[in-house]
Image (cartoon, rainbow, N blue to C red):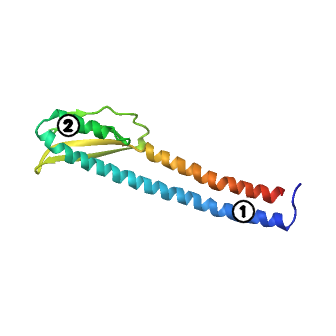
Amino acid sequence: MLNNGISRNLGLSVGAIISLILGFALPAEYQRHDRMLQEDFQATAGRYAESISDLLGFPIWTFDRTNIVQISAAFHQIGIVTGVLIRAPDGNLVYQTSGRGAGAAADRLQRDEPVDHEGERVGTVELAFSAERYRTQLRYLLRSQLTSTGLPLCLRWWEALYC
């Protein structure tokens, strides 16, 4: 049975106001989270690049291939690191890990960091990163926002129209 009284009109008005507010708030919140996660991704990539650069200085200087491989492999196993490439100052390849699932160009990031030992440049390390983990977090946020606000809002509209 359709409710045509003041209660129905009031319910529809409240639903419309809530819909309007959420129509502006949810996209703004999503963009804010996207920006925060992107900044976190950039900062994390920078920290990892600096860390591996610091760790590789002595092994590259002494041509300690075992430690170069171990350090590179450890960083490659980190979820967002998809590749490690190490070059000597002359540009020759010292070591390279194989890439894992490159992903879309928008979801990739590369950081190049010089490798120094006692003030002398001994090489360069390039790290490739995937933003897939951050995109997954954003998709989860979007689903949770739509579920937590959309379902109650639909129920509110239904209640205003039919109860």
Q: Amino acid at mark 2?
A: Ile
As drawn, 130 above or below 96: below
Asked whether residue 70 appears in the rendered view, the answer is yes
Residue at 34%, 41% (x, y): give it.
78
Residue 6 is left or right of residue 77, and the answer is: right
Assign a secondary structure to mark 1.
Answer: helix
Q: Which residue is mark 2?
A: 68
In which image quadrant can residue 88 be found?
Answer: top left
Residue at 63%, 54% (x, y): give it.
148
Assign a secondary structure to mark 2.
Answer: helix
Q: Locate the N terminus and report the quarter of the image it occupies.
A: bottom right
In which image quadrant can residue 22 be found?
Answer: bottom right
Residue at 59%, 54% (x, y): give it.
145
Q: Which residue is mark 1?
A: 16
As drawn, 93 above or below 22: above
Residue 109 is left or right of residue 29, and the answer is: left
Nearer-the-camera pick, 78 or 41 = 78
As drawn, 162 above or below 89: below
Residue at 20%, 38% (x, y): give it.
87
Whole-percent x, y for residue 28 in the image? 54, 60
The residues tagged by marks 2 and 1 sit, at their Cα atoms, a distance apart of 61 Å
- Of circles 2 and 1, the one toward us is 2
Whole-percent x, y for residue 76 in the image? 31, 38
Asked whether residue 85 appears in the rendered view, the answer is no
Local crowd size for mark 2, using a 10 Å CA cut-off: few (<14), some (14–19), many (≥20): many
Q: Locate the C terminus and report the quarter of the image it occupies.
A: bottom right
Residue 41 is left or right of residue 70, and the answer is: right
Local crowd size for mark 1, using a 10 Å CA cut-off: few (<14), some (14–19), many (≥20): some
Asked if disc 2 and disc 1 are in contact, CB closer than 8 Å, the reply is no
Whole-percent x, y for residue 59 in the image? 15, 40
Residue 8 is left or right of residue 148, and the answer is: right
